[in-house]
């Protein structure tokens, strides 16, 4: 054992390695991404690791290996589970041989996701056991338990973390590689009565699964991580049921108060026997949890089933907000309300702040200085000025094309959806010029089928692929178009152009978006053509390259028209000391030259971009 | 020893590295440490903050309002944004250089930097304003703002860690060729 300062995701990865994981697959998604990256970094040499093209593929790869007796893990964020849910729902009926952990990261807030869906509820839907860690140390230890449970019962299990656990850091003791469990897969043993799904098998296994989950609920009632603090509650007869990061908030806020506290580490199958112990002799319970009132509903059910008169409070009773992340302040307020007292924290000891401060700076996330997507969006915007258009965006850095002043994202839903949405609008109003913007990684993950749909069902659509040679928003992971794998192998690139031509598109053009004039001309020419046309705007992400020269404003030539600042919204373009002429922040400028190309008086020069991608570490 | 420290700034300024250095220094002293970071979308010019809790007894890395001993701010507006977390008598170390948000540049929102700094002077009793531009000139680099701020934080007395531990952390986490610049930055002050 040795001590390390680790992010929750790193601890989860090391825990999986300690459990003897043989294969890890997944697709990048905040806040889960670092788990797979850490497995790759700390690979003892015998673990197969891949970034899959999407979560469904990753789930299937992990399942296949688990059929052969390997211990496997597949990682994703919560909306990624939506993509992988098809194989997972069926997989539960088939089961696994080697332990298989599905690592899903929820995102209360949401801080960087489209939904606040609560993966604990997926347990009841899929009948798959769910583990819910509360801290970095708990996650490290519990994932090892998760592999054991999975293998013992022959079922995949869900390990559901949230941002505060995934991206929190703690110093903790972890195993040395010499202490890692060694799992030697037995190999796939042919048995079509086991591995081939048919209705007869499904109905048989369904009955077995229901029976198993009742037993598992009892086992979980004795699981050391489902704890009840202070079994003998005093005169207060009040209790708090909690989970995940909220457990830490509750402990911090209740201190030495006379409250019975229960932490649920395995929300499904729900440990009913433990809950009964918890509820005994209590009058009221406050459920402090994220995101859905899962424990609240479970306890309300238990009370109903056993005729208990305990009042269960939480989100459904308005004690906690229905949406958004639980902050310390919110939990403090909820507990204060529950106990009929004043808040413990934040009111005593808070700075007596006098007058209100001036308006705080508004900082929505924006495209980086020099980002080629800025150039792509601006070129399309200028080319299509005055025409009736719809710009269907998608998930990635380029979603930020929505921000002012570009305002080039009219819709955004989920991975690859822009292509379909554009078609829906086209079929409703064919005189609208429909554009679908999609990134390179998104295109491979879930865009290809949408393009085939458009071609086959005869939509008029301009597909704009924003190819910056990486999966950027999640931290620059490789994908099939980049020619590299997560383990650093150099592989053949999958060619977007070939894929699009194979589908049948006759217009597939590749353009450097930072050649502004050419980009605008190309869009103008292509937009009017019928059918499905593709423009690939290809230029590497600025985080992957080093600029060859930075731009500078010649204040003698600059007329202070403000066009560059107002139209581009580049963070490197600021107002000079005189408050009128433009100035370039050299610490941010990457020399993309977009501003140079649009300046009406040619007052900016010196930029030189460099398309050589740096060697990845 | 228990210290609650908040680091804040704009995505890309180096708050995470500073947080890492403090954490390593704490580990060197065998102090438990828990941190919560903002990473992801916030990096692209958004507000970022890190909460650090040093010492025994913390069940969560998050700090409640009125409970931070120290705010280390890389940007004045961000310092004001986090000010409600500062306890009575707590210290604020802040870089004077603003980062203009794009929303202000294109005229859709305002950012009164001078007003921000005045507000800090009036409402943070134990304030250290670090002239980031001057530090960058005298050190010959703008890249070590985080370490300059850490130095000021040590001298505020509210970090609970000294120059020795932070120096050790720097030597462990930063390549040797940058040690000289970083150590100069750590001891830099406006004298």
Image (spheres, coloured by chain):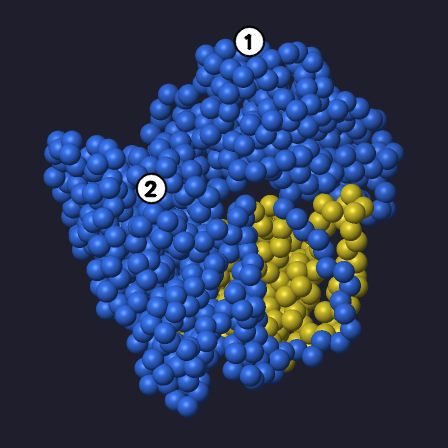
Chain colours: A blue, B yellow
- Residue at 55%, 61% (x, y): give it: A322
> Given the current orientation, which residue lies at the most extreme bottom position?
A235
Pinpoint residue B98: horizontal percent, then vertical percent: 71, 55
**Residue A264 in which image quadrant:** bottom left
Reply above or below: A271 against A28.
below
The residue that mark 2 highlights is A89
Q: Earlier in the sequence, mark 2 or mark 1?
A: 2
Look at the image and tell me whether residue A398 can be seen.
Answer: no
Quadrant in which the N terminus of chain A appears = bottom left
Using the image, name the chain to which the residue with label 1 belongs: A
- Residue at 46%, 16% (x, y): give it: A499
The residue that mark 1 highlights is A506
Tag 2 secondary structure: helix
Pinpoint residue A40: horizontal percent, then vertical percent: 32, 42
- Residue at 42%, 77% (x, y): give it: A310
Q: Nearer the viewer, residue A408 or A274?
A: A274
Q: CA distance from mark 2 to mark 1?
A: 39 Å
Pinpoint residue A506: horizontal percent, then vertical percent: 55, 9
């Amino acid at each position: 054992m040795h001590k390390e300062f680790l992010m929750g995701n790193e601890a989860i990865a090391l825990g999986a390695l300690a459990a003897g994981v043989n294969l890890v697959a997944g697709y990048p998604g905040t806040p889960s991404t670092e788990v797979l990256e850490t497995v790759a970094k700390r690979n003892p040499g015998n673990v197969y690791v891949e970034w899959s093209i999407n979560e469904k593929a990753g789930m299937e790869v992990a399942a296949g290996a688990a059929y052969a007796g390997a211990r496997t893990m597949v990682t994703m964020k919560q909306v990624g589970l939506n993509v992988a849910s098809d194989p997972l729902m069926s997989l539960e009926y088939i089961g696994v041989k080697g332990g298989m952990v599905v690592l899903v990261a929820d995102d209360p807030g949401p801080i960087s996701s489209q939904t606040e869906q609560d993966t604990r509820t997926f347990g009841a839907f899929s009948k798959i056991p769910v583990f819910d860690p509360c801290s970095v140390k708990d996650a490290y230890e519990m994932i090892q338990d998760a592999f054991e449970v999975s293998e013992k019962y022959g079922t995949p299990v869900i390990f559901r973390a949230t941002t505060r656990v995934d991206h929190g850091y703690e110093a903790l003791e972890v195993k040395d590689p010499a202490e890692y469990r060694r799992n030697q897969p037995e190999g796939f043993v042919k048995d079509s009565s086991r591995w081939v799904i048919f209705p007869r098998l499904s109905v048989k296994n369904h009955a077995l699964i229901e029976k198993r989950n009742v037993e598992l609920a009892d086992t979980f009632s004795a699981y050391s991580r489902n704890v009840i603090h202070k079994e003998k509650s005093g005169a207060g007869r009040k209790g708090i049921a909690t989970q995940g990061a909220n457990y830490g908030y509750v402990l911090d806020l209740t201190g030495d108060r006379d409250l019975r506290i229960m932490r649920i580490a395995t929300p499904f199958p729900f440990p009913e026997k433990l809950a009964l112990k918890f509820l005994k002799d209590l009058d009221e319970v406050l459920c402090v949890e994220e995101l859905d009132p899962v424990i609240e509903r479970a306890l309300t059910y238990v009370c109903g089933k056993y005729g208990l008169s305990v009042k269960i409070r939480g989100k459904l009773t308005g004690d906690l907000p229905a949406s958004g992340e639980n902050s310390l302040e919110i939990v403090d307020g909820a507990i204060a309300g529950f106990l009929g007292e004043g808040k413990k924290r934040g009111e005593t000891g808070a700075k007596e702040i006098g007058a209100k401060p001036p308006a705080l700076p508004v900082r929505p996330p924006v495209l980086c200085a020099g980002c080629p997507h800025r150039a792509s969006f601006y070129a399309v915007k200028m080319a299509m000025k005055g025409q009736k258009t719809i710009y269907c965006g998608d998930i990635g850095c380029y979603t930020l094309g929505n921000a002012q002043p570009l305002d080039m994202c009219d819709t955004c839903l989920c991975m690859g959806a822009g292509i379909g949405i554009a078609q829906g609008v086209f079929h409703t109003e064919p005189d609208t010029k429909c554009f679908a913007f999609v990134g390179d990684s998104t295109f491979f993950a879930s865009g290809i089928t949408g393009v085939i749909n458009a071609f086959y069902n005869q939509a008029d659509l301009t597909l704009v692929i924003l190819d910056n040679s990486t999966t950027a928003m999640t931290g620059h992971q490789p994908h099939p178009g980049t020619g590299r794998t997560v383990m650093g192998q150099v592989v053949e690139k999958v060619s977007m152009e070939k894929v699009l031509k194979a589908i049948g598109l006759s217009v597939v053009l590749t353009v450097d978006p930072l050649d502004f004039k050419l980009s605008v001309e190309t869009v103008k020419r292509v937009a009017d053509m019928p059918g499905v046309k593709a423009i690939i705007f290809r230029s590497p992400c600025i985080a992957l390259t080093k600029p060859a020269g930075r731009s500078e404003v010649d204040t003698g030539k600059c007329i202070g028209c403000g066009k560059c600042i107002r139209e581009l919204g580049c963070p490197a373009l600021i107002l000079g000391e005189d408050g009128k002429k433009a100035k370039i922040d050299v610490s941010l400028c990457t020399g993309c030259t977009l501003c140079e190309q649009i300046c009406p008086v040619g007052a900016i020069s010196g930029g030189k971009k460099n398309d050589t991608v740096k060697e990845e570490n | 020893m228990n210290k609650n420290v908040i680091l804040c700034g704009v995505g890309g300024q180096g708050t995470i590295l500073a947080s890492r250095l403090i954490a390593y220094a704490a580990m060197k002293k065998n102090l438990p440490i828990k941190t919560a970071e903002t990473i992801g979308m916030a990096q692209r010019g958004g507000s970022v903050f890190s909460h650090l809790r040093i010492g025994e007894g913390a069940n969560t890395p998050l700090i409640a309002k009125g409970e931070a001993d120290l705010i280390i701010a890389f940007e004045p507006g961000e310092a004001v944004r986090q000010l409600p977390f500062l306890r009575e008598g707590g210290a604020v170390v802040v870089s004077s250089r603003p980062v203009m948000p794009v929303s202000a540049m294109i005229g859709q929102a305002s950012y009164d930097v001078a007003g921000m700094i005045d507000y800090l002077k009036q409402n943070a009793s134990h304030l250290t304003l670090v002239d980031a531009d001057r530090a960058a000139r005298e050190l010959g680099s703008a890249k070590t703002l985080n370490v300059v701020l850490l130095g000021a934080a040590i001298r505020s007395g509210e970090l609970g860690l000294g120059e020795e531990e932070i120096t050790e952390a720097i030597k462990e986490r930063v390549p040797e060729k940058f040690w000289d610049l970083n150590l100069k930055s750590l001891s830099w002050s406006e004298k």
